[in-house]
Image (cartoon, helix red, strand yellow):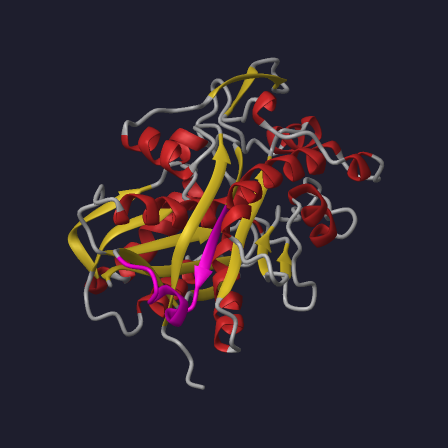
């Protein structure tokens, strides 16, 4: 069996501060609506911290068994977000067998983020009511780049004969201790700050299909190609010199074999100076593979930083807008950078069939 060169998004779901579905969020972003607002959390200078958060009334309650588990409150919120996104896809999953899921979770950051408590696959299955294939599923706590990393593993599963794989990401900053640590490190875009980012939260999932399965579906399709994966040695928490090599390598790898230049870029860039420098370097080094009038979207201004949910959210938005004719371009690049060394990019192309 030869390796497939692409896989197809056949369905998506999400929840974040802009809405409870991919279509709603896509429409809000096209209208340039921002969900960023002041919260109950205060900075060290007693200014309200701005975030893009989901109204808790829109989140399903935590399953009874999970309420008894020993876990951080932020993890409980992430599970509720995840349950909302996964439940939206539940009816489209094959009922006859457990499905593999490849999932991105929050990044473990020094003195800020702690490791996930308990078994995430069991917890996600309980909260969503979906049975996952434990032997084939994979969870990675690597933040923003995790969703695109997940696509690479999904390709391995599709090449081994699986027609459908769930790719997902879930994250939240709705936590007093996490926000206090970020504020102490002067990373939040609070009043009088000249550099920083706006926290957000969300959950997103895409159902990725093999070419054989996708061929049964008529109409426009969005194909994902093999992602480019790299490491940035000089990342934000490293003592190594920062040269911006990681994202540039991810771009180059993702764009290998592309016959057409990229006309649209979607990125997890969060509007801080570190990310701006990195993105600028990657774009400069990939000029020959990009259209001169490249459209660039970085919806963190509308959604805040989605963390581990960024990759699946961006892929789902491209699928929604491209297949509905709301994006003029046919050749897209989605890129994500974690706070630590993980970098990833994936090319997406619009096809008919």
Q: Which quarter of the rendering shows the C terminus?
A: bottom left
Q: Is residue 126 magenta?
A: no
Residue reaching furthest left? 292
Q: Position of residue 256 (x, y in %)?
A: 31, 72
Q: How many marks?
A: 0
Kindly indicate the quadrant of the structure image that contains residue 171: top right
Q: Position of residue 322 (x, y in %)?
A: 26, 48
Q: Residue at x 56, y 44 (%)?
A: 86
Relative depth, front residue between 272 and 251 = 251
In the displayed structure image, the side of residue 314 where residue 333 appears, left or right: left
Q: Position of residue 350 (x, y in %)?
A: 25, 58
Q: Is residue 238 visible?
A: no
Q: Residue at x 53, y 26 (%)?
A: 53
Q: Position of residue 131 (x, y in %)?
A: 66, 55
Is 32 situated above or below 247?
A: above
Residue reaching furthest front? 96
> Which range is magenta?
205-218
In the displayed structure image, the side of residue 194 where residue 172 appears, left or right: right
Q: Is residue 213 magenta?
A: yes
Q: Residue at x 51, y 66 (%)?
A: 154
Q: Is residue 177 visible?
A: yes
Is 151 situated above or below 196?
A: below
Is 46 situated above or below 332?
A: above
């Amino acid at each position: 069996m030869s390796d497939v060169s692409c896989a197809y998004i056949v369905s998506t779901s999400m929840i974040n501060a802009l809405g409870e579905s991919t279509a709603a969020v896509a429409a809000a972003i096209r209208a340039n609506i921002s969900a960023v607002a002041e919260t109950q959390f205060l900075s060290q200078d007693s200014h309200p911290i701005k975030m893009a958060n989901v109204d808790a009334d829109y989140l399903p309650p935590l399953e009874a068994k999970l309420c008894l588990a020993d876990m951080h409150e932020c993890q409980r919120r992430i599970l509720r977000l995840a349950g909302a996104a996964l439940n939206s896809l539940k009816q489209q999953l094959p009922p006859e067998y457990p499905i593999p899921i490849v999932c991105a979770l929050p990044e473990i950051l020094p003195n800020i983020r702690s490791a996930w408590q308990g078994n995430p696959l069991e917890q996600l299955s309980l909260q969503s009511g979906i049975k996952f294939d434990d032997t084939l599923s994979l969870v990675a706590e690597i933040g923003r780049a995790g969703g695109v990393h997940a696509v690479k593993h999904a390709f391995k599963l599709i090449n081994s004969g699986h027609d459908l794989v769930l790719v997902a990401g879930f994250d939240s900053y709705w936590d007093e201790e996490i926000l206090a640590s970020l504020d102490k490190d002067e990373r939040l875009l609070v009043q009088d700050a000249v550099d920083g980012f706006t926290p957000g939260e969300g959950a997103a999932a895409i159902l990725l299909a093999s070419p054989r399965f996708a061929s049964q579906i008529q109409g426009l399709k969005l194909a994902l190609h093999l992602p480019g994966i790299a490491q940035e040695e000089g990342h934000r928490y490293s003592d190594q010199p920062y040269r911006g090599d990681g994202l540039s390598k991810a771009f180059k790898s993702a764009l290998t074999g592309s016959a057409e230049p990229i006309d649209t870029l979607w990125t997890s860039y969060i509007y801080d100076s570190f990310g701006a420098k990195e993105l600028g370097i990657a774009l400069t080094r990939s000029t020959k593979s990009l259209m001169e009038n490249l459209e660039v979207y970085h919806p963190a201004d509308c959604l805040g930083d989605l963390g581990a949910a960024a990759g699946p959210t961006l892929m789902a938005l491209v699928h929604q807008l491209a297949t509905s004719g709301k994006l003029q371009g046919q050749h897209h690049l989605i890129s994500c950078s974690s706070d630590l060394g993980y970098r990833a990019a994936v090319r997406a192309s619009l096809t008919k069939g």
